[in-house]
Amino acid sequence: MGFFQNIKTAKIGNKIAVKTAKCAGEMVNHLILDGHHVKTHDTLNITFSFFNYYMATGLALHNDKPNDFRLSIIHFARQEIIQWLKKVVLTDAMGMAGIENIFNESGEYDENFNAYLQLHKEKIPEYEKENKQDPEIALKKTTAEHLIYYLNTVFELNETQKNEIKDFALQKLKFNQLY
């Protein structure tokens, strides 16, 4: 892939990371303000949920491009989100290496993304019936559900809290579109 293609994919990857960071950061702040004790691993999983959405959307927008173009987007987006996480997650040098490992070697992010895609596959017929105006509604709702599944295991949320967090996540995605 040529120099100018790398610039283009880097720009797209950066945009994915910036949108992810904005939504994940606001969600973490929202949870903290609601009195939840958000830990490092919680921040990572919240980031994963939003990153999944923006990666799926970003890759779908460039589905007509060659595979190396889309792989380059993935590479640049991961590198950018790793840099953001290193800035916001307080940790030592070993922890910094761990953040890179989550996205590159350990496969933890890939497992998370596969779970996200499986949830999307299961729920898409239900989500598509609800709203025909927004072509991304199924992905947005999958993101909110994926987030709630994780947060409920950590914070044991009641139905009101689940609905409020789900609405907050959907609002963030609505006002932070990739394109």
Image (cartoon, rainbow, N blue to C red):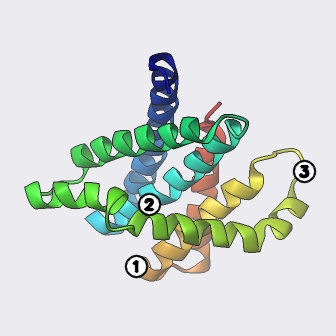
| Residue under the point 44% across and 50% down | 24
Q: Which one is in front, 112 or 138? A: 112
Along the horizontal axis of the image, is 123 left or right of 11? right
Instruction: Tell me the residue that label 1 is attached to.
Output: 154
The secondary element bearing badge 2 is classed as helix
Identify the amino acid type marked 3. Lys
CA distance separating discs 1 and 2: 12 Å
Q: Is residue 8 above or below residue 139?
A: above
Q: Is residue 36 above or below residue 62?
A: below
Identify the amino acid type marked 1. Val
Among the two numbered marks 1 and 2 on one chain, the one whose residue lies closer to the N terminus: 2
Identify the amino acid type marked 2. Ile
| Residue under the point 49% across and 16% down | 4
Instruction: Tell me the residue that label 3 is attached to.
Output: 132
Instruction: Tell me the residue that label 2 is attached to.
Output: 46
The secondary element bearing badge 3 is classed as loop
